[in-house]
């Protein structure tokens, strides 16, 4: 009796190499990955703030084009402090940080021509306020380290639109990171150090806020370290864990809330993100829920101002406490002392 040879099944390695069985190849690859690494899927942290609204792209493009035009030529720059090592300037809204260097050279003239200028800190395009420019490499290295180590104290002023909060002082802690589409988002404090889709990790983000005026009622006062004055019971502590904002309520009323922010960390768009989470987006900040038109006026910038900087001089070790002039929108919201 003649034996008929049985049909031989292809080996797993053949199936993986063959282009004629793509579905089986994909399944085998997944199975192999699962068996070798023990990982079947990755669950990423869920952001707690919404993505950028669709209309923000058009507004951002328009503002970027305007800023590029303004940044292309030197502009008047207010110098708040200067010595042979550093210069502290008041950056206007609507210009890019790098344009500060060329404008500073034009403002100061020949005395700075031999200097090696560096930006020690940066501000968003539409944020105004204090920026530090170092003139020599020695000062640059030391001052950049001070900013990186968070030994520089900063305050910002923000004009937000939304229901007035039920607190006068608040301390908010959350996670911070990029979502799968690349936008900066707020994450839960429990997600800090977890991996995000792009491979980065959720980082700690912390900001203190105090309300200065609501609907232009109250008096403007100087910054204070209210978290260190023994009145912690008056400060509302917010540890972000939920998607629902602590600042949201069912009211559709939009109050004008002038706040001072004390960032305790240095994350990208930190104050803007925390204001969005609190239900108090900054006026003009279309990326993070703010409106660009208010009371019949269209604004081409967000109302955020880097008000003060306190740091030890990188060369002389002298303590510097510097303050920028107040922008007009701050003066409109509260009477100054």
Image: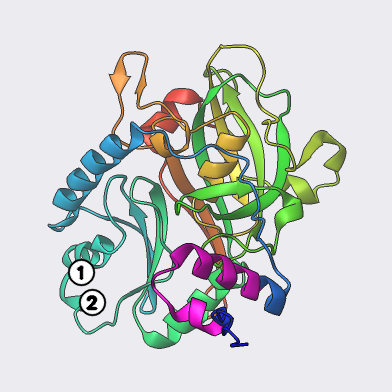
Name the residue that disc number 2 marks: 112
Q: Are marks 1 and 2 in contact (CB under 8 Å)?
A: yes
Residue farthest along the front direction in this orientation: 1
User: What's the coloring here?
Assistant: rainbow
Q: Position of residue 80 (x, y in %)?
A: 38, 57
The region drawn magenta spans 13-33
Q: Where residue 246 is drawn, which disc sits there?
A: none
Answer with left or right where residue 172 lies relative to residue 320. Answer: right
Picture layout, residue 306 above or below residue 72:
above
| Badge 2: residue crowd in 10 Å (few <14, some 14–19, many ≥20) | some
Foreground residue among 97 and 90: 97
Is residue 21 on the magenta stretch?
yes
Asked whether residue 314 is in view, the answer is no
Residue nearest the viewer, comparing 96 with 244: 244
| Pick the front one: 193 or 73 | 193
* Mark seen at residue 105: 1
Please report the residue visible at 54 percent of the width from the left and 80 percent of the height from the top.
10
């Amino acid at each position: 009796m003649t034996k008929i040879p049985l049909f031989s099944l292809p080996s797993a390695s053949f199936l993986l190499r063959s282009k004629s069985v793509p579905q089986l190849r994909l399944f085998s690859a997944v199975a192999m990955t699962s068996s070798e690494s023990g990982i079947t899927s990755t669950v990423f942290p869920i952001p707690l703030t919404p993505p950028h609204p669709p209309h923000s792209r058009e507004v951002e493009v328009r503002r970027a084009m305007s800023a590029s035009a303004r940044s292309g030529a030197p502009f008047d720059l207010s110098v708040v402090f200067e010595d042979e090592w550093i210069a502290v300037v008041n950056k206007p809204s609507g210009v890019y940080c790098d344009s500060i260097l060329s404008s500073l050279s034009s403002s100061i003239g020949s005395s700075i021509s031999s200097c090696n200028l560096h930006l020690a800190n940066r501000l968003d395009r539409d944020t105004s306020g204090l920026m530090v420019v170092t003139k020599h490499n020695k000062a640059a290295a030391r001052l950049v380290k001070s900013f990186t180590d968070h030994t520089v104290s900063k305050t910002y002023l923000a004009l937000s639109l939304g229901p007035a909060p039920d607190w006068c002082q608040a301390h908010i802690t959350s996670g911070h990171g990029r979502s799968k589409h690349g936008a900066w988002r707020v994450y839960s404090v429990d997600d800090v150090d977890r991996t995000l889709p792009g491979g980065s990790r959720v980082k700690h983000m912390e900001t203190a806020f105090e309300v200065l005026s609501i609907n232009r009622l109250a008096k403007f006062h100087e910054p204070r370290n209210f978290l260190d004055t023994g009145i912690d019971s008056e400060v509302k502590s917010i540890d972000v864990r939920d998607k629902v904002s602590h600042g949201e309520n069912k009211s559709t009323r939009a109050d004008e809330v002038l706040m001072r922010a004390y960032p305790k960390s240095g994350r990208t768009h930190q104050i803007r993100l925390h204001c969005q989470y609190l239900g108090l987006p900054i006026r003009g900040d279309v990326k993070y829920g703010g409106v660009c038109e208010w009371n019949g006026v269209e604004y081409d910038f967000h109302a955020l101002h880097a008000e003060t900087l306190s740091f030890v001089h990188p060369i002389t070790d002298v303590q510097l406490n510097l303050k920028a002039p107040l922008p007009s929108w701050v003066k409109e919201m509260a009477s100054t002392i």
